[in-house]
Amino acid sequence: MVLIGIDPHKATHTAVVIDESERELARVKVMADRSQVAVLLDFAASYVPRRWAVESAGGLGFLLAQQLVRAGEDVVDVPATLAARVRVLGSGRGSKNDPNDALSTAIAALRDPHLRTVIVEDHAMVLRLLADRHQDLTSLRTQAVCRLHALIAALSPGGVQHRLSATAAVSALRAIHPTTSVQAQRKQMALDLVADIRRLDAGIKEVKKRTAAAVVASGTSVTDSTVSARSWPRC
């Protein structure tokens, strides 16, 4: 068994092959482009059995790691902190450069049997991405609603004493007649926030629709009925 450590970057990837004695057998630097996997597989063709160790396979090395797994390769994820620790402690390879980083990544994978095995993305990742998007949108909407509350309170004594909706906010603003340029600007900003909130509501509705479709496609029974796209926070 040989280990092939990869130090990924945006423009290039450096790969170093080691045997079970940590002896370097070969190295190569490839361009980060459409042919990167084909070039790496051609380089590694004579090394069998083999395992690939990609530094930060969930980060900068994500795409390359996924491409290797889809090609049927055995790939593990080496945290950048672990690779750095091996590099610093390793005699004769303390300087930081691409070949040393790739070598340290390979050695880390050789010595640590508990590293995460990279698997092909599936429906779980789709649901995770949609959940993250839903959280981002609801967070932005909460901020917009709180700012809207503050603007209305600055225009009308007591502001709005109940949970806001876009319709309720517009109704409250219609009753406000600015007498100064500052008040006029506050009212206009409040109306802008109402428009932002309506756009965010539409985005949340679309994400929930896509999530429902993804749940059906995944064949799971996972649903998220706890968050309503029409619920409004108190500020």
Image (cartoon, rainbow, N blue to C red):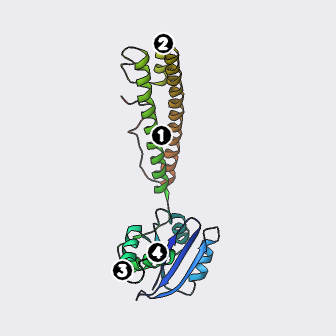
* Kind of residue indicated by mark 3: Arg
Amino acid tagged 2 = Ile
Residue 111 image label:
3
Q: Is residue 145 above or below residue 173?
A: below
**Residue 114 x/y as whole percent:** 35, 73
Where does label 1 land, which residue?
137
Query: Which tag, 4 or 2, sits closer to the chain's start?
Result: 4
Camera-near label (4 vs 1) is 4
In the rendered image, the vertical position of residue 15 relative to residue 79, given as above or below: below
Q: Is residue 74 visible?
A: no
Query: Which amino acid lies under the numbered mark 1 shown in the image of this protein?
Result: Leu
Asked which secondary structure carries label 1, the reply is helix
Point 52% across, 47% down: residue: 213
Residue 166 vs residue 98, the one in the foreground? 98
Distance of mark 4 from mark 3, alpha carbons?
A: 15 Å
For residue 43, say whether it is visible: yes
| Kind of residue at badge 4 | Asp
Residue 158 shows which numbered tag?
A: none
